[in-house]
Amino acid sequence: MATTEEKKTLRAKLEKYEGKLNHMYLDSKGYVTIGVGHLLSTVEEAQKLGFKDSNNLKASTEAIKTDYDEIKKQPANRLAVFYKKHTKLTLPEIDINALTDKHIASFEGELKRIYSDFDTYPVDVRLALFDLIFNLGMTNLKNKWPTFNTAIKAKDWQKAADNSSRAAPISAERNKYVKDLLEKAAKAKKDTGVAAL
Amino acid sequence: MTKSKIMFFLDKEIFRFPLVLLISGLAIGCSAANDGISDREDGEYSTPTLAAQWTDAFVLPGLLADDVMTVSQQDIQTLFTKKWYASIDVKNTLKQGISTLSSCEMYFNNKTSDLRAIRDNEQSAFLELTSACEAGRLISNAAPSSKTYLPKQIISNDIASQLPKNLALVTSKSEWKSVMTNASKQYWADINTIVEFERLSDYQAAYLSDGGKQVLSEIARGDFNSDGYEDVLLKIEDSLEGGSYSNIRLFGLTITVEGKWRLLAQY
């Protein structure tokens, strides 16, 4: 289970790289989304959330449906300001954070399915894997990263670091964040090994 | 009337010059100077002199703040100075200090190989804008072509087994290097096994592979490299099941005399 501190670090990084929007928008696949990439696959799912209107009052289910339907018919791959003008409701930060925590818990379960001893990995390795799975999804990470996964399962953190970069358009900065985490774990492992001699 | 219907008329040779101009001008953007009926010789179409044609998948007009009408190539050129629906903060520009772009012209003037949105979550929107600008530039500069090997309909359920592997969806840089150096893997479908095909329109379809979804769109046809042969501009939108990764890529391709797809450039 990710610790409170890990979740806090993860949330901060995910917000930085994925953005954090308090109104509904479309993700790049054209799905209605809220917060830090939280998919709202149905209007009913959106209606379960504590959206607020412009007077900071609890939004009605009808108002949530109006926002949802309005966003759903827009094109994908637009800037947030484009979607914002089509919405009237917002989701409080506390609710967005709760959704992100739920998301993190779901990804943790998936990471354990890919890496059976995930819980035993150093914190830095776990943080690196969280960033990758959030971005790549479980199927791609599990099936399309054979060199990286072999290194992770062998706990060869340096080799994993060397094979951790994602293709464009992932920023060099985000790739470096993941690589640095894995290299830090590799160095710690090496130092521990030397100390044990 | 859709472009494919127009192409059907071309194939059946039932049209004459004024009719095709009228139809083309109304249904799809094109700039044409037609000198007769197309004929076919050994798989090669000697077309009437036909400049660029573009489809509904050319989205630049819809990305602008104001409504515009694009009928000719010259019309497309005028779009470059028009404001996008919103401005975007970018980094790694050619000119120091420029950090906000709001038109194709500004993008062209500040373009570098590593130009990107300042905020990572705006990169997809930025790629949508820049790929549309690049497509517009290519269409507006396209020369008339006199010959083509391109099929009437490019978007099909088996095109992934014919297009080069550069179109494949590979998210790991290491695996990408390995794929590109593996001579036994030549085609997109050699890398991504397509498990589902969904036609979205005459010019657009979704190709689903293991955890990946790619939407392929035919943007335009024209002679983009001035060799007299018709080329095609394809856009591919990559995304992953359960992940936030997405990419938008634009490719110029043609078919060689041997009948093989050849990559001209990635823009």
Image (cartoon, coloured by chain):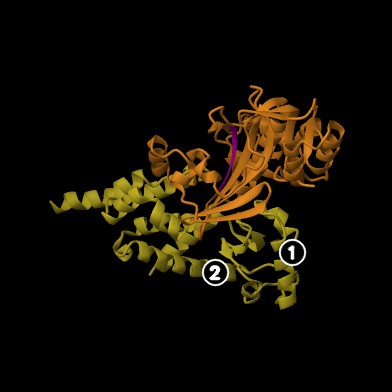
Chain colours: A yellow, B orange
For marks 1 and 2, give the CA distance.
Answer: 22 Å
Provide the secondary structure element on which disc 1 rests: helix
* Chain containing the residue with disc 1: A
Q: Identify residue type, mark 1.
A: Glu
Report which residue position mark 1 lands on: A70
Q: Is residue A100 shown in magenta?
A: no
Which residue appears at 50% of the width and 67% of the height? A103
Q: Tell me if label 1 and label 2 are in contact, CB under 8 Å.
A: no
Q: Which residue is mark 2?
A: A99
**Does residue A136 appear to the left or right of A63 in the view shown?**
left
- Magenta stretch: includes residue B253: yes
Residue A2 locus on image (x, y percent): 40, 67
From the top left corner, tell me how far across and down residue B179 is, in percent. Answer: 40, 40
Residue type indicated by callout 2: Leu
As drawn, the label of residue B59 is none
In the rendered structure, which disc, 1 or 2, sits on the residue that comes first in sequence?
1
Residue at image point 62% right, 77% down: A48
Instruction: Tell me the quadrant of the picture where the C terminus of chain B can be found.
Output: top right
Kindly tell me whether residue B223 is visible in this rendering.
no
Query: Which is more foreground, mark 1 or mark 2?
Result: 1
Q: Can marks 1 and 2 be said to lie on one chain?
A: yes
The quarter of the picture where residue A152 lies is bottom left
**Magenta-tinted stretch:** B247-254
Give the side of residue B17 with respect to residue A39, left or right: right
